[in-house]
Image (cartoon, rainbow, N blue to C red):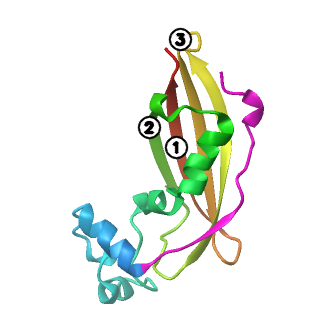
Amino acid sequence: MIDRSFIGFEMEPFDATLEKGQMELFAKALGEKNSIYSDESVARAEGYSSIVALPTYLIRLGTRDDLTYGLFDKLGIDLAKLLHGEQEFILERALCAGEILRGVKKVVDIFDKKDGALEFVVTEIQYHDEKGRFAGIDRCTFVIRNR
């Protein structure tokens, strides 16, 4: 069983730049047709400072080996038993290319079901902009199969 005392544990803060080229590739890979996600002139005409990040783009910022595998290692999770259960994104506002966000990954819950056959680890990465304003949350639920 995963030690419940890890609830509230925070990883070291990290900075992530919203890179225009990567955002364009992400939008293209998802087949996004709205040009505010890939054409700077269209985004600016709509009142944005640059192209806009798709809401799911936060997954790209938080998918780093040190954050993901470092946390699993600390919690003693066997990767062979790990499943991705759910992902949720909450944005306070549109995020634009060129912004630098500071993220902090935190374990917000650990619980089990089926008498411990399944354990769940819920993490959140809270992002704030350079002025310290809340920008968004990337919440993820991982499932560990114990039997």
The prevailing secondary structure element of the residues shown in magenta is loop
Q: Which mark is residue 114?
A: 3
> Marks 2 and 1: CB-CB under 8 Å?
yes
Give the Cα separation between the discs numbered 3 and 2.
18 Å
Looking at the picture, which amino acid does disc 2 mark?
His
Q: Which mark is residue 84?
A: 2
Q: Which mark is residue 38?
A: none
Q: Residue 54: image x %, image y %?
A: 39, 65
Magenta highlight range: 1-19
- Residue 132, by quadrant, is bottom right
Horizontally, is 141 left or right of 129 in the view? Answer: left
Return the disc, 1 or 3, that comes first in the chain's sequence.
3
Q: Residue 99: image x %, image y %?
A: 54, 79
Q: Which numbered mark, 2 or 1, is in the foreground of this view?
A: 2
SS class, disc 1: strand
Q: Nearer the viewer, residue 18 or 132?
A: 18
